[in-house]
Image: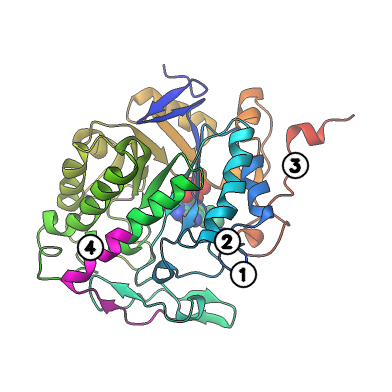
Amino acid sequence: MTDIFSAVQLGDLTLANRIVMAPMTRCRAGAQDEPTPEIAEYYRQRAGAGLIVSEGVQPSIHGKGYYRTPGIHDPFQIEAWRTVNHGVHAAGGRIVMQLMHCGRASAEANKAPGAETVAPSAIASRHALYTPAGMAAPPVPRALETHEIAGVIEEFVQASVNAREAGFDGVELHCTSGYLPMQFLATGTNRRSDRYGGSPQNRARFVVEALEAMAAAIGAGRVGFRISPGSPYNDMQDDEPVETYRALLQATDRLGLAYVHVINVPIPSLDPLPFVRGNWNGPVIGNNELTLESAGRLLATGLVDAVSFGRLFISNPDLVERFRCGEALTEPDRRTFYAGDALGYTDYPTLEARMPA
Ligand SMILES: Cc1cc2nc3c(=O)[nH]c(=O)nc-3n(C[C@H](O)[C@H](O)[C@H](O)COP(=O)(O)O)c2cc1C
């Protein structure tokens, strides 16, 4: 039986345990979309994870869709991320940056002047987004011209290089939750007639080319990606998820990437974890509503090499220690998930802090 506390190798990433902190947008970046000292403290507190996957970070001004999400496209941001990574590494942790390009899932009010909303096809999302002025409907995105796509991939490549320069151990390409890479994958958002649309292989091409280029720039063993096959989240629709994700996994399997991170949401045509194991030979991280017990059972099936926890890491900075000691867990407060300050962010106590002196 695989011990959740045992070390594991994901590509070039050596994890001290198999407990990964899932990526979580917390909308607390500074005025120049940089990570603040509070953000550095938040990640430092959670360095006991075998691997931290950062919140979604935009590779360019165009990739931003939400309020107060951080970027990695400006020297000032790179410098600020150095502080985050230094803190995590000094505490013995590992951290990769999740690269999130929102594509059509964007509110114009959250974007910098001059930033565009682009997508594979000019089809607006019906999912409203928070802005400081209230909820806003996303605009109809501009469909990318074929000749522009290499430039978008270059944004991911440069962001990966910047992430390494800032001290991240690697990067994770966010291909779930209805953002740009998933917009290319799904039939509902990709109506293209060029080589990036139509067949499953064509719809997978954007993600495959992006991962290939990122791997060439920083090493395949430092690049992972995240998927949730067939998930409808964020107004998504895919008529053939089995074909789409088989094409994607088979094309990326040969790249020798660090891992695929799977949000496990079974749909009638597809049970994600057995499906991924059947089409992919590299490491797999499994996610979604896991507990210590269910994660242990999942590891025992051999379908995953590591497991990730999201909300439990929000409210339990020392989650790994608590698991190890069998200690009670703190419930997260949803009201402070997004935006705000230290409240519900860096003020959740550790076991140590609760111990009497
Ligand atoms: C506040 C919050 C923000 C999230 N932001 C992201 C994100 O930026 N990128 C991503 O891939 N998933 C994001 N997720 C999804 C989580 O990574 C994870 O898949 C989800 O919470 C299920 O895991 P859990 O049951 O352990 O919380 C977010 C979830 C929460 C609760």
The answer to which of marks 2 and 3 sits earlier in the sequence is: 2
SS assignment at label 4: helix
Asked if the residues shown at circle 4 and circle 2 are in contact, with their CB atoms under 8 angstroms apart, the answer is no
Q: Which residue is mark 2?
A: 34
Q: Which mark is residue 31?
A: 1
Q: Is residue 160 above or below residue 33?
A: above
* Residue ID at (60%, 57%): 35
- The residue tagged 4 is 150
Q: Quadrant of residue 31?
A: bottom right
Q: Position of residue 53 (x, y in %)?
A: 48, 44
Furthest toward the right, the residue is 357
On the rendered structure, is 34 left or right of 129?
right
Q: Nearer the viewer, mark 2 or mark 3?
A: 2
Report, in whole angstroms, how far the alpha carbon at label 4 lies from the one at label 3: 46 Å
Look at the picture and state if 91 lies above or below 312.
above
Q: Is residue 268 above or below residue 350?
A: below
Mark positioned earlier in the residue sequence (1 or 4): 1
- For mark 3, give the secondary structure: loop
Camera-near label (4 vs 3) is: 4
Where in the figure is residue 74, as x and y percent of width and height?
49, 63
The amino acid pointed to by label 4 is: Ala
> What's the magenta region?
137-154
Dot 1 amino acid type: Ala
Label 3 sits on what residue type? Pro
| Up/down of 16 relative to 345, above or below | above
Say which residue label 3 marks: 349
* Disc 1 from disc 4: Cα separation: 30 Å
Q: Is residue 133 left or right of residue 199?
A: right
The first of marks 4 and 3 along the sequence is 4
In the image, is residue 228 part of the stretch drawn in magenta? no
The residue lying toward the viewer, choosing from 271 and 92, is 92
